[in-house]
Image (cartoon, helix red, strand yellow):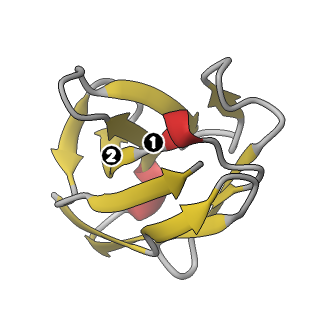
């Protein structure tokens, strides 16, 4: 089992940058595919990016490709999402999720708010 805590959200102007971090506690962090999801007001939670447990391969939603970069540090049990050239549509609550062996996202953090002003 893993416990996830996000940090790094805030208010930024369009074109700015933020770096989100997710700290995990528990065993076998390297066995978890880690992902970020976001939820805007009145919308469903959507996939943003993930990094595989097996080979560190990353995948991104089309809407963030080229602007967001996801990385992980298995020694520190952390994942980081660098978000550049932010747009107002990026506004939402960002959630860190963990999927044991990449099977299903069953562990979630409490979320961190990202607000991008135009």
Residue 47, quarter of the rendered image: top left
36 sits to left or right of 40? right
| Helix, strand or loop at mark 2 | strand
CB atoms at circles 2 and 1 under 8 Å apart?
yes
Residue 93: x, y in percent?
Answer: 30, 49
Structural crowding at the residue carrying mark 2, measured as other residues with C-alpha within 10 Å and reported as few (<14), some (14–19) or many (≥20): many
The vertical placement of 37 against 60, above or below, is below
Number of callouts in the render?
Answer: 2
Q: Is residue 63 visible?
A: yes
User: Residues under labels 2 and 1: Cα distance?
Assistant: 6 Å
Q: Which mark is residue 35?
A: 1
The vertical placement of 58 against 23, above or below, is above
Q: Who's the residue at 65% across and 23% down the image?
A: 63
Query: In terms of depth relative to the viewer, which is nearer, 8 or 54?
Result: 8
| Helix, strand or loop at mark 1 | strand
Residue 57: x, y in percent?
Answer: 71, 36
Residue 112, quarter of the rendered image: bottom left
57 sits to left or right of 104? right
Q: Earlier in the sequence, mark 2 or mark 1?
A: 1
Q: Who's the residue at 32% across and 46% down the image?
A: 97
Query: In terms of depth relative to the viewer, which is nearer, 54 or 40?
Result: 40
9 sits to left or right of 13? left
Give the residue at mark 2.
98
The vertical placement of 108 against 78, above or below, is above
């Amino acid at each position: 089992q893993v416990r996830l805590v996000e940090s790094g959200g805030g208010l930024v102007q369009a074109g700015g940058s933020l770096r989100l971090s997710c700290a995990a506690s528990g065993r076998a962090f390297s066995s978890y595919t880690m992902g970020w999801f976001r939820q805007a007001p009145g919308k469903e939670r959507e996939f943003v990016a993930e990094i595989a447990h097996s080979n560190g391969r990353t995948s991104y939603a089309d809407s963030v490709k080229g602007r967001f970069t996801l990385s992980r540090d298995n020694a520190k049990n952390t994942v980081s999402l660098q978000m550049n050239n932010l747009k107002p549509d990026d506004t939402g609550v960002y959630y860190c999720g963990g999927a044991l062996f990449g099977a299903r996202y069953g562990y979630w953090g409490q979320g961190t708010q990202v607000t991008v002003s135009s």
